[in-house]
Image (tube, rainbow, N blue to C red):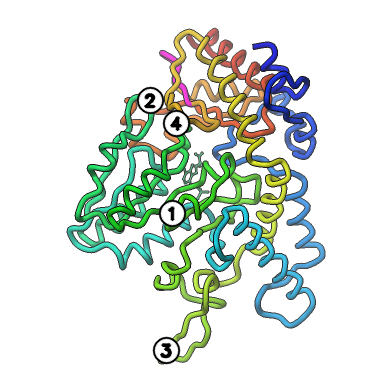
Amino acid sequence: MGIARDVLNGTRCERSVRFAVEKIRQDFPVLSSSVHDKPLVYLDNAATSQKPRAVIEAEALFYSRNCSNIHRGVHELSERATKCYEDSRTKVQQFLNARESREIIFVRGTTEAINLVSNTFGRKQVGAGDEVLITAMEHHSNIVPWQILCEEKGARLRVAPVNDRGEIVFEEFEKLLGARTRFVALVHVSNVLGTINPVREMIEAAHRRNVPVLLDGAQAAPHLKVDVQALDCDFYAFSGHKLYGPTGVGVLYGKAGLLEAMPPYQGGGDMIRSVTFEKTLYNTLPYKFEAGTPNIAGSIGLGAAVDYVNEIGLESIRAYEDELLAYGTRALEEIPGLRIIGTAREKAGVISFVIEGIHPHDVGTVLDQEGIAVRTGHHCAQPLMERFKVPATTRASLAFYNTAGEIDTLAAGIRKVKDLLG
Ligand code: C6P
C-alpha cells in the first residue's frame, strides 16, 4: 500500500501512473480551504466537481471584457462573444469526436438534454403499444422523461436488470430488445455504483434491431475518453458542472440526420429563420435547438474546462483515478461492518457504501464535521436503492485532484463515525 499511496500523492513514480496531483490541486482555489476548521476533503465530485482557475477566469473575462449577446449584434463585443461561444462548441465537438460542430447543442445539463430528446425525437418515435428500454441503474433524469412519454403515448417502459455486483445482465438486456422496442436510453457510468456499462455492445445489439440509443454520459465524460463516432450512439448527454465546468450548461450530441428530422424543443429567438403569424421557418442546426439567449458565459467556461481536461489528458486521468479507486476500495473494505454497494469489474471513481446499524445521513453529518464532503441519500436513483434493498447509501466520488491522503482521512473519519454511533 505504501508505494501506491506515495504515487497517488504524486511523490513517487514506481508504477505506470505518474501524476502531479499536488501541482494540479493548486489550480483549484477551493481545495486549499477549510471546513469546520479542518482541511476540506472534497469527495462529492459526482454531484458536482470543483472548478479550476482557468474556468473561473474564462467566465470572469467574458463578463468583464466581452459581455454581449450572441448571433445578434454587428458590434465588436457581440462578435467577440459569438466567436468565444462558437469556439467552445468546436472544443466540445473535438472532445466527443463528433463529426460536425452542428451536432453539438448547448443545453442546461444532462437533464435538459434527455428531456429535449424525449419531447422531440421520442414523441415522434414512440406510439401506443411501443416500448422504451432503460436499465435498473438509471438516474431519475433518465427514467422520468421516458415515463412521462410512455404515459402520454400508451407505451411501456421496460427495465434491464442488474446483477448483485451492479452490472447489467447483458442477456436480459438483449432479450428485452423486442419487436416493439422503439428507443433505448442507457447510463454510460452509474452515479451510484460507478459501473462502466458495456455501451458499445449494447448499442450494437440495439442497432441490429434498428433501435436508436441515447447515452447518459453525466458521470462518464469527466472520467473516460468518449468517442461518439466509435460508440455509434445516436445521442449523448453530459453536464458541464461535473466536467470541472460551470453549472447551468451541458451538451446534447445528436447525429445530424436525426437532429435535422426532429421538431424543435422550444420556440423563441435564435431558433428561427423567419417568422410570420401564418408560419415560422426554423433555423439550421444547432440553433434550431437553442431558443432564447443561451448560457453564454457558462458555455465559454465549459470550453475552458474542456481545454483544462485535455491538457491533463483523459488517459492519465483514468489511470490515476483507477489507482485511487483501487486504493480507496481496499481501505474501506478493511473497515468491519462496511459494505460497498457496486462492485462491478469495470468501475469509475465512485464508492457507495452502507455501515451496519448506522444511517447514511448520520455518517455524512459526522464526516462533514471532519471537513469531509460526501453525498448521502438515494442519489436520485430510488429504484436502484430498492434493487439493493437499502434506503440510502453514503457515496464518496473521486476526481483527479483527490489524493490517497484524503482517502486515509475518509477511512479515519468512518472509523470515528463507528466509534461515535456504532
Ligand atoms: N447526478 C449526483 O449526485 P444534471 O443535474 O442535469 O446536471 O445531471 C443529472 C444526472 C443525470 N445522469 C446521471 C448519471 C447523473 O449522475 C446526474 C446527476 C448527481 O449523482 C446529482 S443528482
Report which residue position mark 1 lands on: 233
Circle 3: residue type: Lys
Residue tagged 4: 193
Residue type at mark 2: give it. Answer: Arg
Figure disc tally: 4
Q: Does the magenta stretch include residue 142?
A: no
Q: How far apart are marks 4 and 1 (CA)?
A: 22 Å
Decide which of 345, 69 is in the foreground and name it: 345
Q: Badge 2, how many Cα within 10 Å: few under 14, some, many 20+?
A: some
User: Mark 1 falls on what kind of element?
Assistant: loop
Picture residue at 42% right of the left edge, 38% below the top: 197
The answer to whether the residue labelled 1 contacts the one labelled 2, judged by CB atoms less than 8 Å apart, is: no
Residue corresponding to mark 2: 165
Q: Which of marks 3 and 2 is in front?
A: 2
Q: Is residue 317 left or right of residue 353?
A: right
Give the number of the mark in front: 4 or 1.
1
Residue 332, image x and y in percent?
53, 16
Residue found at the far left of this picture:
129
C-alpha distance separating marks 4 and 3: 49 Å
Residue corresponding to mark 3: 279
* Label 4 vs label 2, nearer the camera: 2
Q: Do the residues labelled 4 and 1 touch (CB within 8 Å)?
A: no
Dot 3 falls on a residue whose secondary structure is loop
Mark 1, residues whose alpha carbon is within 10 Å: few (<14), some, or many (≥20)?
many
Q: Which of marks 1 and 3 is nearer the N terminus?
A: 1
Residue at the outermost right position: 65
- Among numbered discs 4 and 1, the one appearing first in the sequence: 4
Magenta-colored span: 352-358
Please tell me in which quadrant of the rendered image residue 152 appears: bottom left
Percent coordinates x, y for residue 171 in the rendering: 27, 37
